[in-house]
Amino acid sequence: MAALTELLAAQPFWFWGGLAVALLAVEAATGTGWLLWPAASAGAVALVALVLDPGWTGQAVLFALLTLVTTFGARRFFPRGGAAAPGDINDTTSRLIGQSARSVAAFHHGEGRIALDGKEWAAELEGGGALAAEAEVEVTGIRGAILQVRRRR
């Protein structure tokens, strides 16, 4: 163990480079996004240790500061989630907007079910009210799993 400690003290670049690779491997396996920035920070500290050698305390402080700044900065400027980008082929519901459908049964109080693409969907009629069975409608939007429709003219 003493030999390993001496090696790391003499070559901190390899410690930080190894840590960066290990963190990146765990990030690739999990895909959470939380370890990407610490991995990049460890890589940056490895380069700083190779050029400047600020000592172990300086390297640890630099790693901590870089990890905090990059992680919080990334969360602020690269938010995750939200709506799919327009034209995203994985967004299967957005292609329903503008499609024609028919009501399966009469709508009551603006709520009912429609048939579209061989499936039955919960739907809300714009403006509420009633709608007869087999009436033609057009999908105008989506709210969760409920399609918003209007009478077809």
Image (tube, rainbow, N blue to C red):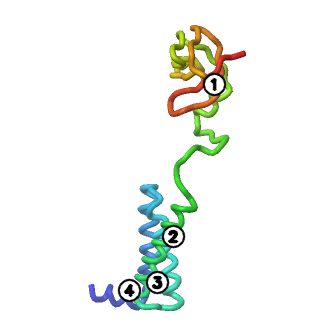
Q: Dot 1: within a 10 Å radius of its alpha carbon, few (fewer than 14), some, or many (20 or more) residues?
A: many
Residue type of the residue flagged with mark 1: Val
SS category of the residue bearing label 3 = helix
> Residue 32's quadrant in the figure?
bottom left
Q: CA distance from mark 4 to mark 2?
A: 26 Å
Q: Dot 2: within a 10 Å radius of its alpha carbon, few (fewer than 14), some, or many (20 or more) residues?
A: some
Q: Earlier in the sequence, mark 1 or mark 3?
A: 3
Q: Which residue is mark 4?
A: 8
- Do labels 3 and 2 touch, CB within 8 Å? no
Q: CA distance from mark 4 to mark 3?
A: 8 Å
Q: Dot 4: within a 10 Å radius of its alpha carbon, few (fewer than 14), some, or many (20 or more) residues?
A: some
Q: Which residue is mark 3?
A: 13
Q: CA distance from mark 2 to mark 1?
A: 43 Å
Residue type of the residue flagged with mark 2: Thr
Q: Total number of numbered labels?
A: 4
Q: Earlier in the sequence, mark 4 or mark 3?
A: 4
Residue type of the residue flagged with mark 4: Leu
Q: Which residue is mark 2?
A: 70
Residue at 42 percent across and 74 percent down: it is: 19
Q: Earlier in the sequence, mark 1 or mark 4?
A: 4
SS category of the residue bearing label 1 = strand
Viewer-side residue, 105 vs 107: 107
Q: Which mark is residue 139?
A: 1
